[in-house]
Image: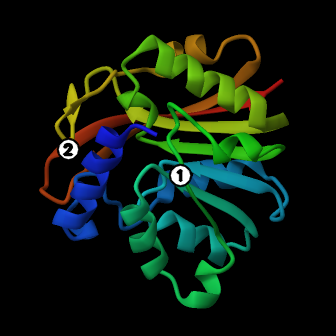
Amino acid sequence: MSDSLRDHWNKKYIDSPITKLGWYESNSSTSIQLIENCAVPKSSIIADVGSGATTLTASLLELGYQEIYCIDISEVALEKAKALLDKEMADQVHWLVDDITNPSTMQQLNNVAIWHDRAVFHFLTEDRDRSTYHSLLQKIVGPGGFVIMATFAINGSEKCSGLPVQRYNAESLSEFLGDGFDFIESVDHTYQMPSGDLRPFVYVRFQKI
């Protein structure tokens, strides 16, 4: 695991209340809609990559999903995410501290039905990190499984949280995933930060062949 990246994200979660963080969503409605569109059994594995201190987990539990894996490089983020849930709900979730650019525990997953990534992939500006990301999702997403990704749009910000990002559209994300994944749908979404600033995102959904 990259100590510098882990420290960077831990510090972000230590220094600010989660509701003030630049990526905080009080309502993950776009992600929820795309996950529901997959129409998988509620017992299917959902891997929320870079989950942070998200409100999405509570929404998925309320919808009846039973096998949720919250994965983040920041242990502080995951502890704050647990604190958003009561103990009974938190105990239903699998919490994994891992680095998507050098995965260890994630390698043990298999037959993932939905890979959900809101705002992680666009931080991978090096070819080797994108290649590791692709290899991992290719390995752990089961046949017929879905990949949902949300990144800064082409006209989006060039930086986030002080780090450079790579911007995408549906076509470039399709090119990245390649022939092994069928494009299903995309959604343009303008996210309003807690500060009031607007950030254009693109959400895409693919299915593994």
Residue 200 shows which numbered tag? Answer: none
How many other residues sit within 10 Å of disc 1, few (<14), some (14-19) or many (≥20)? some
Q: Quadrant of the C terminus?
A: top right
The amino acid type found where label 1 is placed reads Ser
Residue at disc 2, secondary structure: strand
Give x and y (percent) for residue 15.
Answer: 16, 64
Residue shown at the point (68%, 55%) measured from the top left? 36
Q: In the rendered view, does 173 fall on the left or right side of 209?
A: left
Occupied quadrant, residue 17 = bottom left
Give x and y (percent) for residue 146.
Answer: 72, 38
Compared with 36, 142 (above or below) is: above
The amino acid type found where label 2 is placed reads Leu
Query: Looking at this rendering, what residue extends furthest in the bottom direction?
Result: 87
Q: Earlier in the sequence, mark 1 or mark 2?
A: 1
Q: Can residue 53 be seen here?
A: no
Occupied quadrant, residue 61 = bottom right
Q: Can residue 200 be seen here?
A: yes
The residue at which mark 2 appears reads as: 198
Give x and y (percent) for residue 38.
Answer: 74, 47
Residue shown at the point (46%, 40%) measured from the top left? 1
Residue at disc 1, secondary structure: helix
Q: Give whichever of 19, 2 is nearer the camera.
A: 2
The residue at which mark 1 appears reads as: 31
What is the CA distance from the residue labelled 1 to the residue labelled 2? 18 Å
Give x and y (percent) for residue 35.
Answer: 65, 51
Residue shown at the point (67%, 12%) measured from the top left? 178
Residue shown at the point (57%, 27%) measured from the top left? 133
Q: In the rendered view, does 33 fall on the left or right side of 37?
A: left
Compared with 63, 21 (above or below) is: above
